[in-house]
Image (cartoon, rainbow, N blue to C red):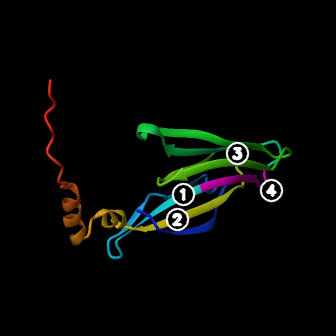
Amino acid sequence: MRGGMEKSFVWGVTLDAAHKEQKWEGTATENTVDCTVTTHTLSVRQVVLSAAAKEGEVNVVELEVLGYNDKKQKIPICVAKAGGSYVTNVDILIEDQAATFHLTAGSGPVYISGTHQTETNIIGEDDMDDLPDEGEEEEEEEDEVVDSPPKKKSKK
């Protein structure tokens, strides 16, 4: 598939004591009516601890995704404490899969932000480009048949 239409959106979630878990559904989607497939990419760039966070409380944000061989991975992506640095820059790329962000320690609020990119492609577009036209197939066969002069026998 190629020649797709790309779109980019600002993305963000908030984790706090009332919402310790936020899911991102980023699996590819197929539209059978339009014959298209839309793929999703989430690029997480920043985790910000709110100025309203409890003084001295450690806040830990964990990301849960499927890794190699569909093995569940739980990875801490940020540890922040009020009174320290409130902004943590991260570089996380999640392609065509669901992900869950957990606040495993602390009560936040913690803001996670980045960009959500989509690309929509027509199903089978490449397959159609690879098929020869009706006339092309005959021409190729003709080109393959080449009259070669008879080989001369060498004298020994």
Asked if labels 3 and 4 touch by Cβ distance under 8 angstroms, the answer is: no
Residue at 71%, 52% in the rendered image = 47
Q: Which is nearer the N-term, disc 3 or disc 1?
A: 1
State how far apart marks 2 and 3 are (Cα).
33 Å
Discs 3, 1 touching: Cβ within 8 Å: no
**Callout 2: helix, strand or loop?**
strand
Q: CA distance from mark 4 to mark 1?
A: 31 Å
Foreground mark, 2 or 4?
2
Range of residues picked out in magenta: 43-53
The amino acid at mark 2 is: Thr
Q: Quadrant of the C terminus?
A: top left
Q: Which mark is residue 41?
A: 1
Q: Nearer the viewer, residue 107 or 152?
A: 152
Q: Residue placed at 50% from the left, 65% from the top?
A: 119
Label 4 vs 3, first from the N-terminus? 4
Q: Residue furthest bottom?
A: 33
Residue picked out by circle 2: 118
Measure the C-alpha gap from mark 4 to mark 3: 12 Å
What residue is pinned by disc 3?
Answer: 106
Per the image, the residue denoted by label 4 is 52
- Left or right position of 142 against 28: left
Q: Point out residue 114 in the picture as x, y percentages from the top left corner.
A: 66, 58
User: Disc 1 to disc 2, how far (Cα)?
Assistant: 6 Å
Q: Looking at the image, do the residues carrying marks 2 and 3 touch, with CB atoms under 8 Å apart?
A: no
